[in-house]
Image: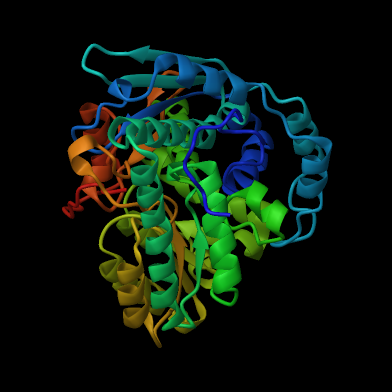
Amino acid sequence: MLYRGRDGDKPITESFLDTDFYKFTMGDFIFSDTQLADAVVTLRLKCRTKNIKLGNVIPMTHLREELDHARRLKPTNSELYYLRGMDVYGNRMLSEPYLQFLKNINLPEYNMRYTHEGDIELEFAGPYKSNTYWELFGLSIVNELYHRYALRKCLYSEAEHSRYMMTGLSRLLTKVEKLRQYPDLTFSDFGTRRRASRDWQEEVVEVMATQLPKQFRGTSNVYLAMKYNLVPIGTSAHELFMVAAGLADIESNGDRDAIRASQNEILGAWWDKYGHGLSIALTDTFGTKFTFDNAPAEVTRDWKGTRQDSGDPLRYKQKALQWYRWRDVNPKEKMIVFSDGLDVDSMIRIHKDCQGEIIDTYGWGTNLTNDFEPRPNVGLIPLSLVIKPATVNGRGLVKLSDNIAKAMGIPKDIARYKKIFDYDETYFEPCMY
C-alpha cells in the first residue's frame, strides 16, 4: 500500500528493535567491557545542512512527546527471542547477560533547548551501555518530525499532497530499473537514521526485497529484518573508536602512543568477540591513512574488508588496493562496503571502477529512504543530521574523517588529535546527507 505521508496516532518509534543492527553488536561489546559500559558519554544532535533551523519547523511539545515515548521502550519477549536466536554472522552472537540487561533497560534522560535563532540543542548523557541507543531513536524521530511538519507548511490540498508523495514512489521505481541493468551490484538499506518516515522506509524495503531479491542483501533496521525475514546488516560506528580514544586520553593523561593504541585495541577486541562474521573495519574515524599504516597485519589478512564512509570513494579504493598488496593479500578476495552519501549513479560509477579488482557492496542510506521531489525554497529536502558522542567522563571527543567537512569536536581538540594521528587530509566536500 502506498505510503501517504499522513500523520497518525502511532508514535514514531514503537519497537526497541526499530534501530540499526550495529546498535546491538556494539551494545553487547560495550556492555561486556566495564570501562566502556560505565563511562559517562554525552551525545549531541548536530544539523550539518546549511540554513536549516529545526526549531522553526518542529514543535517542541511534539518532539518531547516522541522522545519521552522512546525513552520508555524496552524489547518485548518476542523481540528478545529474535535477538537470542540471531546467528547470521556466528553462533549465538549476543550474550545472555547482555540480553537480560536489555530486558530491563532504562534510557537516560535527555536535555533539550530551543534557541532564539531557531536551532534545537538536544543532548543525551548517561552510562554508555544504555545511552548509545539514543543515537538512532533521536535521529529517526527528529527526521520524521521535520519531514512531517515541512510537508504541512507547503502542501495545502489533498491533490498536491498526493502528487508529492507519488514523486517518492516514482523515484524509487526509477532506481529499481537502473539497478536491474547491473545484476551483480549488491546493496543494503542503511536508511533508518535519516528516513522520511518509518512507514516509508518499510515500503522501500518491501519494494527492494520484492523487485531486486538477488541484489538487495538486507536492511540495517532490525525490526524490519525480523518482520520480513531479511538479513540484518551492519558493521560498527565511529562512536566506539571516539570513546575509546577519549578514555585512553584521560587514563594516560594525554599520552600520544596510548591514544593511538586504543584504536587497534578496539579492533582486536572486536575480532575476539565476533570473529570473521562481523569483520568489516571502519577506517576513517581519525583518517584512513592512520588505520592503513598502523593496523596489525591480521586485520589486512583475516578481516573480510573495510567500510568507506567519507572522502573520495575511488581514491579510497586505490588506497585499499595498495594496503592489501603491501601485506601480500589478494584484494580480489576482500570487500569494501561503500556507505557515504550514495545515490544510484554514484553506486554504478563505483561498481564499474571496482570490477576485477575488489569486491564491492553498498550501504545505501538517505537517498534510498528520504528521496522525494526537493523543494529547497521551503526547506523540504533531506537533511544531514547526526547524533555523535561529544564527551566521555567530561573529556571532549573528536572525529576527523576522510572529509574535513565531517570533522567533529571543538577546534582545540581537533587540532591536537590531528597531531596525534598524523592527520594531513585536505579533501573537503559539503555534507549533503
Outermost bottom residue: 356
Locate residue 99 relative to residue 302 in the image: left or right.
right
Locate residue 159 relative to residue 36 in the image: left or right.
left
Residue 215 horizontal/vertical position (percent): 54, 75
User: Relative to 149, is 287 above or below?
Assistant: below
User: Relative to 377, is 264 above or below?
Assistant: below
Q: Is residue 118 visible?
A: yes
**Tally of marks:** 0
**Relative depth, front residue between 32 and 138:** 138
**Relative depth, front residue between 256 and 412:** 412
**Relative depth, front residue between 262 and 391:** 391
User: Relative to 5, is 230 above or below?
Assistant: below
Residue at x-position 37% and y-position 77%: 351
Residue at x-position 75% and y-position 37%: 98
Residue 395 horizontal/vertical position (percent): 39, 22
User: Relative to 196, is 275 above or below?
Assistant: below
**Relative depth, front residue between 157 and 130:** 157
Q: Is residue 262 visible?
A: no
Q: Quadrant of residue 180?
A: bottom left
Q: Quadrant of the N terminus?
A: bottom right
Residue 307 horizontal/vertical position (percent): 44, 61
Locate residue 50 relative to residue 328 in the image: left or right.
left
